[in-house]
Amino acid sequence: MYLRATLLCVALLLAPASQGAKPAEPDPQLAAALREAALNANTFDDRFDAEVWLKDMSTRLGSRVPDPEERIRILRGVHREAQRVDLPPELVLAVIDIESNFDHYAISYAGARGLMQVMPFWLDEIGRPDDSLFDIDTNLRMGCTILRHYYDRERGDLHRALARYNGSLGSRKYSSKVLERLRTRWRRQ
């Protein structure tokens, strides 16, 4: 038992940090963006475009999220939050696909939670400790805000932004995986 616990601790110490591993000092700009994001919400601008997009993506997501109501809730949230931060919703779907396989109750070995695997410390940082990262809307709002922050920080370099999101800056493995999933499953023709 003691050996197993020791090995687990060593593995966690040697493992690369996840996107949400708490930095020594949280990024104040990102914390401010998350605070603002928690207060603002939008919906689809055009009903026809929304219906076309939802139907297309719902068909693609059907095998992963069999409950049609949950599937539409996830897709509406993805579209809303991606549009809010000016990211392609299909990119966000690819991130979720890799991060949690669309399980909104997912928890990583590092403690990241929900669809986009957001670390819980962010809730304290933005003064919203009672929010739940298992809530689809909260998780998407925070995850999209974080991804956009890293995209801006990396001056539009998507590989670096995705690697930073995942905590694997310096490696292209994660970003290549997300972009491949985007190309093969989520990109609209």
Image: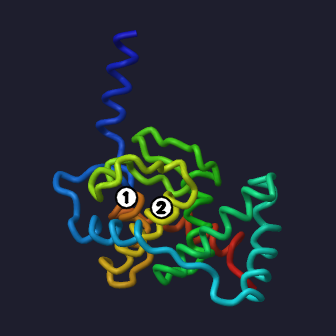
Q: Residue at x 33, y 64 (%)?
A: 170
Classify mark 1: helix, strand or loop: loop
Residue count near mark 1 (Cα–Cα under 10 Å), binned few <14, some 14–19, many ≥20: some
Q: Which label sits on residue 173?
A: 2
The image shows residue 28 at horizontal and vertical percentages of 21, 66
Vertical order, 166 against 148 (above or below)? above
Mark earlier in primary sequence (1, 2): 1
Depicted 98 relative to depicted 17: above or below: below
- Point out the image quarter for the C terminus: bottom right
| Left or right placement of residue 80 versus residue 124 in this view | right
Residue at (36% x, 42% y) in the render: 15
Q: Amino acid at mark 1?
A: Ser
Amino acid type, residue under disc 2 in the picture: Lys
The answer to whether marks 1 and 2 mark residues whose Cβ atoms lie closer than 8 Å is yes
Q: Secondary structure at mark 2?
A: helix
Real-space CA distance between mark 1 and mark 2, rounded to the nearest whole angstrom: 8 Å
Which residue matches tag 1?
168
Residue at left offset 71%, top offset 69%: 185
Neighbour tally class for label 2: few under 14, some 14-19, many 20 plus, Cα within 10 Å: few
